[in-house]
Amino acid sequence: MEIEKYYHKSDALVVGTGLAGLRAALALADAGIDTITISKVYPTRSHSVAAQGGIAAAIAHASDDSTELHMWDTVKGSDFLGDQDAIEMFVNEAIKTVYEMEHMGVVFSRMPDGRIAQRRFGGHSRPRAVYAADYTGHVLLHTLFEQCIKKRVRFFNEFFVLKLVLREDGVVSGVIAWDIRNGGLHIFNAKATLFATGGFGRAFKITSNSFTNTGDGLALVLREGLPIEDLEFVQFHPTGLYRLGILVTEGARGEGGYLINGKGERFMKRYAPEKMELAPRDVVARAEQTEINEGRGIDGKDYIYLDLRHLGAEKIKERLPQIRELAMNFLGVDPIKEPIPIQPTAHYQMGGIPTTKKGEVLGDGKTEVIPGFYAAGEAACVSIHGANRLGTNSQQEAITMGRISGMAMAEFVKKASLFPIPKEAIEQAEEHVRRYLEGKGSVRPFELREKLHETMTNKVGIFRNEKDLSEAVKEIRELEAEIPNIHVEDKGLKFNLDLQEALETENLLIFSEVIAAGALNRKESRGAHYRTDYPKRDDENWLKHTLAWKTPEGVRFDYKPVVITKFQPQERKY
Amino acid sequence: MKRKFKIFRYNPEKDKRPYYKEYEIEIGEGWTVLDAINHIHWYVDGTLAFRRACRSEICGSCAMRINGKNRLACKTQIKTLGKGTIKIEPLPGLPIIKDMVVDLDPFFRNLEKVKPYFIKYSPLPEKEQLQTPQEREIINEAAMCILCGACTTSCPSFWANPDYLGPAALLKAYRFIFDSRDEGGKERLEIINDRNGLWRCHAIFNCTEACPKNINITYYIKKLQNLAVNNQF
């Protein structure tokens, strides 16, 4: 089979076109840097588009507020694992981000006097979420896409990255990608490369994430022998539509929605008497799962209710129109008249590719910056979210860190030279695709994926223990061993969805071991990581970040200290 | 319950011409058309190609023609499609890459023609530009467009003339021209006040009917036509 090769050069390369990637591309274009973006999808299909509730910034429109409070809420929300220097920078830059996005034309919801409106969100002690009804991510992403059109960013849409080019001298000089639409290898050579490749939700059976969220960036980095930070911290969003996992914004509770168990109780009073439904997501998701596990789900089943009826038709239609539409279409439930059946859903990865506060990727996870390699958004770990992210901090992080990383890249490429891509890298990428297009396996990608889903959901979920996690690591390694045996039915070059799913499944299997092994390794409970056999937070031994490398023998760990500046760890109560 | 699907197939690498292939599968409670074609792809025929991403009606990837209407596969509940065979085809009026996958580049090129971005010449304030809820309301619905292409590819004027900007691009123009903060209205209006722009709309409401976000696109195109006639800029 003939596989054509195409060569591209640019100063900067951005992989991923969600909020982080597009904001970085825009910062680069603004600095006059020739920039290429690569994405598996058209930019407006990126999963940032599905973010609903809002974007956090202490602009103090709906009450008093301050960046110090935003910082404290984020640190406490992170269960003290967030790096406080990064968080402090983040909360200050967040305000600038909101005004800057407004200046690009975002249609934020407004107060009667014309200023930007704000609403409550979980774990934030003030109404701090700037929003556009319940489709905030949509308007933010479309606005950045529009601005990138204006600035003539060069989009390469529907390209799947096969290989990160990390040269032997330790420099990253681009990526090698597969043209999904036409087939063919594209070699993208750049002075600087940013990974804004998003999250890993598709490792789980019930997830709010798009089909595209297969953690490709994580797998590409792990394959090159680089570490990933804190991957054991998986956020389960408390309100996914029952059985489907489709997101119902926390803004629904921010607007006053109740969580109700099978006995008709607002059960959060037993778990977070003060904050109730607006406790952070780790606390609420655990409370829901406890109710379900103890037989207090609706009719004893594995779901509970989100009740919005008391908000009234007008407020629901104005503030939560998308939620209403989704509940009506997918579950046949009109939230104006009936409560919505919901359950926790895998939503967000707190960990990721370790970076500095400027988005520079750390080759040893600690201090050693890899020349020419950056990461931002959900794919990266700065770490702003520590062990648990607060709602509305992720869209904010994606845009803010996208901008900061893009600016840092612009400075870097002005002085950097272009290092060629070694031909071995191209051969490896070609071999990778040929294995699927020319090979004869016996196991279908989706079979492996279904098995992975069972393992991750049943054994690496909200409540974890040694036995389950040990089994999970073993099972994932067995599934990984099946990768060479994957059978791709479609042998064509053009829009080969089967090939793409095989590549994605491979990626899921590569990083999932790191999640499970990291969870097994961390013998404490902190934020979203809860061990029933180690139910307490253990600051003495575990107030530290996990760094994890893949090796043939299994996952290798190292650690780095948490940056603590203003706030000493204390008991976390809501 | 078993349902039959008649699916458009075309792989330019091996097929001389397109054909339809029938699949009969067991469908589950509450399944959407996307659930069904995913199932077919995973368990029955791995060569089937289509686009999908969010599966929650917001990314716009899975627009296709279902029983003769442009819809999002992820939004279309199978139980709403009657009892017969369900016919699935690509969006009309665009070059076909493979099966349900069409080339959206012409669609996005048309969008780019209308200066689909916020324009401001006056100095920006330090904080936000003020906009009342009433001013925002005028563009709220138009800003909900997900660029799925269902509208433009349902329009006979677009089928007849691919240079016609089409409803999606015109809606984007509306979203900015009627934004109380934007200052690019006049230059955008000059672009769309053209025989391949506003005046190729004959108000047959196909676009409005096709829109999965229930946006009254025809109404907004009429607003633009009124503005062009009265030349308020």
Image: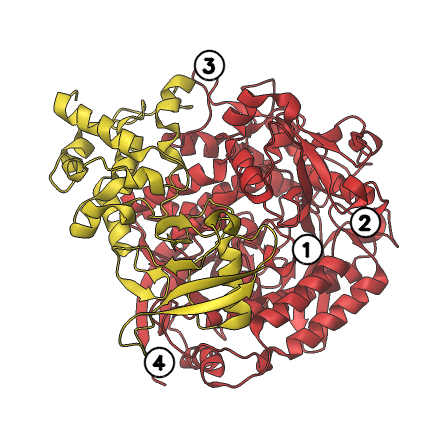
Q: Which amino acid does label 2 sit on?
A: Ser
Numbered circle sitting on residue A230: 1
Q: Earlier in the sequence, mark 4 or mark 2?
A: 4
Q: What's the residue type where badge 3 is placed?
A: Pro
The answer for which chain carries disc 3 is: A
**Are tags 3 and 1 found on a single chain?**
yes
Tell me whether marks 1 and 4 sit on the same chain: yes
Mark 3 nearby-residue class (10 Å; few <14, some 14–19, many ≥20): few
Judging from the image, what is the letter of the chain drawn in yellow?
B
Circles 2 and 1, Cβ within 8 Å, touching? The answer is: no
Chain letter for the red colouring in the rendering: A
Residue A112: numbered disc: 3
When the figure is inspected, residue A206 is found, relative to residue B205, above or below; the finding is below
Q: Earlier in the sequence, mark 2 or mark 1?
A: 1
Residue A13 position, x and y percent, is: 39, 59
Label 2: few (<14), some (14–19) or many (≥20) C-alpha neighbours in 10 Å: many
Q: Mark 2 points at which residue?
A: A525
Q: Are marks 2 and 1 on the same chain?
A: yes
